[in-house]
Image: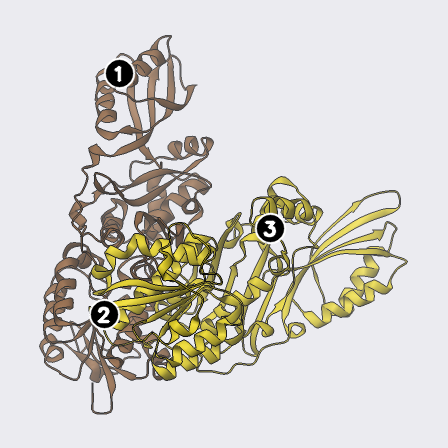
Chain colours: A yellow, B brown
Amino acid sequence: MTETNKVRIAILGLGTVGGGVYQLFQAQADTLMAKTGLDAEIAAILVRDANKPREGIDPSLLTESFEDILHDETIDIIVEVMGGIEPARTYITEALKAGKNVVTANKDLMAAHGGELLDLAQEVGRDLLFEASVAGGIPIIRPMKQCLAGNRITEVMGIVNGTTNYILTKMDEEGMEFSDALAKATELGYAEADPTADIEGYDAGRKLAILASIAFHSRVTFSDVHTEGISRITAADIRYVRDMGCIIKLVATARETEKGIEASVQPMLLPVHHPLASVKDVFNAVFVHGDAVGDTMFYGRGAGRFPTASACMGDIIDVMRNIRFYCTGRIGCGCYRHVPIQPMEETIQRYFLRMQVVDRPGVLASIASVMGKYGVSIKQVVQKPTEEGRAELVLITDQVQEKDFLKALEKFRSMTNMIQEISSVIRVYE
Amino acid sequence: MTETNKVRIAILGLGTVGGGVYQLFQAQADTLMAKTGLDAEIAAILVRDANKPREGIDPSLLTESFEDILHDETIDIIVEVMGGIEPARTYITEALKAGKNVVTANKDLMAAHGGELLDLAQEVGRDLLFEASVAGGIPIIRPMKQCLAGNRITEVMGIVNGTTNYILTKMDEEGMEFSDALAKATELGYAEADPTADIEGYDAGRKLAILASIAFHSRVTFSDVHTEGISRITAADIRYVRDMGCIIKLVATARETEKGIEASVQPMLLPVHHPLASVKDVFNAVFVHGDAVGDTMFYGRGAGRFPTASACMGDIIDVMRNIRFYCTGRIGCGCYRHVPIQPMEETIQRYFLRMQVVDRPGVLASIASVMGKYGVSIKQVVQKPTEEGRAELVLITDQVQEKDFLKALEKFRSMTNMIQEISSVIRVYE
């Protein structure tokens, strides 16, 4: 702080989110004293090119030197909105060691190295807050760490990627195929030039790792999360699923069972009456089940300049309150247990299966018999003739261990005289 | 605290919620050190009759004397779950003055006297937390005070009464009339013996006063909230509303306009695609609009033993963290502005109007002409013949100032040769 007791803040990065944090801070600056008992100011902004003119930003704030920020003892809070693992990891580590508090929106970093960074923050008695790293502006981390702290949380699941939710909404509502819906999302700026991290579920997987660590008080990293994307989902799948009273969403789901933690991201059939089923377009929602509170859900905009800046600004205000009361570091990592991660094949699942089969007597019986052999029972089945001598077989199974289902599937692949194609395999919620 | 650094807690009241807090505390006690850095124990429970045997409760904890609790300097936290204004108000005041922290689930008290109690807490540097007072287990107060602190919140609206939401759900889904649905709610224990506070919107109004005070940083008390109940809603209204793409909910809504704060509870038409429209049965949800975050929603169980205890337990854990870091009182009342309350008749609304009219040429023209005179324009209209010479006229207006609409309504009441009955007048969202 300066001698006048003003909290001084440095922003690392001035992209979409960094610019949003700067603007929102300016809009809120005159309320900070009333909210926290302290005033604050932006002291520096780290950019790659300090000479590039930037509209609405005082050029004297721009710097290309992290070292200058690090060694400026009047800077109390670092807001890291650069993204990516390095140099963000090094910068945050050094900032904490220098006694600075950190606010970050960086899901990649928190999903991979959150444990070590939070341990360091605790060690040095500083705040490392990351509300913006999951589901943008939706309050979810603080509610889980504080409001629901009296619960044993058994399940957290969410729609935490806006790009894929927009694509699936278009496929569902307008009958588009995946590639057309992706093109539309790209055109509207909802999908990046390289959409891999979104459509393959990596982005959702990182957010899930962060959520699961908080929910179960045991560190879950991105590498612990099984991820599957939505590129193989077809308009035909979505039509069948609708007829069966369900909708397909890219669901990030983690639960704690007696055997350990299961964490996965995948397209999944949800019943249409499930609270997450009505989350449309780029909206996000996180569903949390606690033993005392029951089902809760948190809904809103999971990305974008100002929703993400809103989360950063909430964190900044919280750090300021802690600075005012000399209690930075009051809420630490929270991972005080070590629960093993359950491999996907050990989990219990239900499946939606769509196959192209030969339309002759005995085929369904043979398929049912293979399923029976591996302990897979059938809950719902629809068979429709397609072209001469062929039919489409669509079924939903009862709960079965994934490895048993995979054995049945392997057997189906060898039954080429009856099964011409396995068109879709999608997990079903509950 | 005791010499062993154990936080000591007294519970005032051992009804549904008090018993839930006790049970949940016992279930969570062994996690508290890991979560907060301190251990805790229940030191005393205030009851009316300490001799009455109570299953699962150590009888040595029971006391009939608040004075004993107040003067026990080892007690750090008071959990007030008695309900009602007095003696809760006096007890909380005295406890704060004695340097104790307070957790309360008491919406009646916080809606009427929250300002004075929070000011006192701030003065003495202690916590007064009340997450359980609104929407039971749903995290809403801390998210608004902390996560969304970087926003200017312009609107908060919610379904915050489970009893009425259950009744309206039954009326909507099963075509029940109000009295039958209320009987069903009573049978299931969702409605109290005297259901007035629920069905007349008083309970929701108290919760709204608390939410609005936090949202707008300006004190709103229950007496500032306009309340209307659901007892006049009929199955016929609900059928018409459905045909018009809407659903009727008891909505608690507060917004800040240029003229001031509007706060009201009333049955209201919501479009079926509004996020609150799909909140069914006894579930609650609170919808918050902030200038940066956009629309957010918080959903879950708004009442009941364990959901409410969950909120109290979250508050207890937060107070313990503050005790550990010597920073109790770090988040105060937050009402640093004084925004005037807007009288209901000054607000801008839309209306659903159902009338029994004489079925002859010129009647609709006369009604439309009256509306035109008072600046009420019609958005949607349906007229259906009912019996010989009569018709039912159902319409939805555009936005109009309430006082102008009331003038038109008064005029209609005098047009007895054309309008036989004004069956329903219900506000429409947006």
Q: Is residue B278 above or below residue A403?
A: above
Mark 1 lies on a secondary structure that is helix
Q: Chain of mark 3?
A: A
x then y, percent, for residue A273: 52, 50
Instruction: Give amino acid for label 1.
Output: Lys
Residue B201 vs residue B99, the one in the foreground: B99
Q: Is residue A292 above or below residue A181?
A: below
Q: Give the left or right position of residue B323, taking residue A236 as reference.
A: left
Instruction: Give amino acid for label 2.
Output: Arg
Residue B430 is at least partly visible in this image: yes
Q: Are marks 2 and 1 in contact (CB under 8 Å)?
A: no
x then y, percent, for residue B245: 46, 34
- For disc 2, the marked residue is B330
Q: Pointer 1: residues within 10 angstroms few (<14), some, or many (20+)?
A: few
Q: Chain of mark 2?
A: B
- For disc 3, the marked residue is A247
Q: Chain of mark 1?
A: B
Q: Spatial distance from mark 1 to mark 3, Cα to Cα? A: 49 Å
- For disc 1, the marked residue is B373
